[in-house]
Image: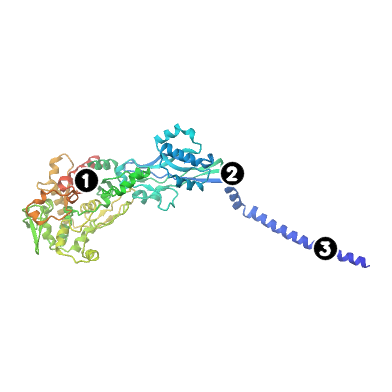
Amino acid sequence: MEKNKTSQDSLKIFNRRSFIISSIGLIIGLIISIRLFSLQILNNSFYKKKSIDNKVSIKATPPIRGDIFDNEKNLVAANSSLYEFVVFKNLNKFYLKEVNQLNSLIDLNLNIPNISKQLQSFNSYSPFILSRANWDQIVKFEKNKFLFTSIKIIESKKRYYPYKNLSQIIGYLGKSSDNSELYPKGIFHLEKTFDDHLQGKPGKIFNEVNSRGKIIREISIEEPVKGKSLDLTINLNLQNFAQSLLPSSNRGSIVVLNKFDGSILSMNSNPTYDAQLFEDRNNDAINSFFKDPEKPLLNRAFNGFYPPGSVFKPIPALLALNKNILNENTEIICNGFTSLADRNYYCWKKGGHGRVNLKKAIKESCDCYFYELAKKINIDDLSDLATSLGLNFTYNIGLSNAQKGLIPNKKWKKAYLDQGWYQGETLISCIGQGYNLTSPLQLANLYSALLNGGKFPYPRLVKDEPIKYLGDELNPNHQRAILNALKAAVQEPSGTAYKLNIENPNFVKIGGKTGTSQVIRIKEEDREDDLYKTKDTEERFKDHSVFVGYAPIEDPKYIASVIIENGGSGSAVAAPIAHKVLNFAYQENV
């Protein structure tokens, strides 16, 4: 009986333990089942992707940058093949020895310590770029190819700039300063402004790799997407022709505008630089550009600012008409100078122009006429009118470092010089001297405003950009008076640019205005004896030569603005260049 009871107790204990063990097993099985369900059903796609990633290597290939064309679909920036020396660490454990050997054989001037440091953590199965390879280097390498097992030559793409004289418009590519960008990007001018438009999208190469990263086979290729193209308003033939006219001995610039839509047909600057040298990584040449005192990187047509000289004179004349200070027949007597307080202000023509009205004042560029006019106008009104006509304004046309120049007023002088405004400064301002600073592009826009009746198209370099307008409408009678005077300056005897008709009688007839922009003030004693005309003047102190003209004269379409730094007389230097450029544009119907 006792024994039977013990047996029953043991059985109960066994059953209890079996139940507990079975329950635990059931719970564990349930957990495992839930986990398996999660792995295989719920998160199947996630873990499948992880599995693929563990055996597939994805290598990005560079995007193909969009092309840039002129207004006749001539290619002005594209892509071309380049070749590079690369090293594969997995092909030879003595790869660094081969790198040194290559450097000695071909004289690549490699930074071996830096390369060695970078290679330590670099993927053994990926190509590490050592240097670009030119044709001579490729030939020499091929002759000694048997010496190298880890070093190869691979083909890649680079930007190609076929026209040097467009470098200051198109710009160039480069890497970001912090190397955060995987591929080169635009860092200057149009290449920078339209980088997103031109960039394109990288491609992908899918390779199967082993656990050590070695490529077993190529699975698939996703081709890179080429960036969008960019069509410019620039006409390549006109651009090349205009560049050929800029004197090599002088810094200077040319801008040609279409009056009707603001298209910039040509924009030239001298000296210029070759953007291809940036793409070719010619560091010596690049460093020389930045150090050159002639500043070849400066687009003088856009960012060169100078006193405009007499091409500015239509503005005070227009202001005087607007304010009823005079009419086109009002005359003054020019004896060669005007006095204000205890100072004399001289006309460029010793002895004076005699009786002068508005037409003659602009036609013969009489300074005294504008001195007398200036005594009756307010500098703030002059600044406001000049700004509405396109000066003192920042033009964002896609080029880097846009600036506004300067047409001064009382507020500006007080803010920047902490001085009041003097009437004598208004006299100097009215002949385009003093604090006035304008660019060739701004002067072209000024004459576009005059020709278009005040409202003029915003200048543009890209064809697809919409046409928009600036400025305020002019009084038609006042506009006519100014344009008659500008026509006379070129087409009538005694006009400052009349000799253009004698030199090139078969050229298109033009209107316009000459300017001689003083760099330094002429001393009164020199002026009295006429010594300033015969004195040897240091080159950098010689006057700038300025001319703004338009053609054809009866129905103008083209406007040309020319400045030759330290070139002297506007009629002798800048005007003939502008006439040739306008004639080319007209004859070629660009």
Label 2, on which residue? 210
Q: Quadrant of residue 72?
A: top left
Which amino acid is tagged 2? Answer: Asn
Q: Secondary structure at mark 1?
A: loop
- Residue depicted at x 44% and y 31%: 143
Residue 85 badge: none
Q: Is residue 189 left or right of residue 308?
A: right
Dot 3 or dot 2, earlier in sequence: 3
Q: Hey, which residue is sitting farthest right in the picture?
A: 1
Specify the amino acid type for callout 1.
Answer: Asn
From the top left corner, tell me how far across and down residue 411 is, in percent.
Answer: 23, 65
Q: Nearer the viewer, residue 121 or 341?
A: 121
Q: Of the numbered discs in the image, which one, if any, rests on residue 250?
A: 1
Q: Residues within 10 Å of mark 1 (few under 14, many from 20)?
A: some
Q: Nearer the viewer, residue 176 or 282?
A: 282
User: CA separation, marks 1 and 3?
Assistant: 110 Å
Q: What is the C-alpha distance between the residues marked 3 and 2?
A: 53 Å
Cα–Cα gap, marks 2 and 1: 64 Å
- Label annotation for residue 15: 3
Left or right, 250 with respect to 213, comes to left
Q: Secondary structure at mark 2?
A: loop
Which one is earlier in the sequence, the residue at label 2 or at label 1?
2
Quick one: quadrant of the N terminus? Answer: bottom right
Q: What's the residue type where badge 3 is placed?
A: Asn
Can the viewer see residue 413? yes
Q: Residues within 10 Å of mark 2 (few under 14, many from 20)?
A: some
Name the quadrant containing residue 271: top left
Q: Which mark is nearer the camera, 3 or 2? A: 2
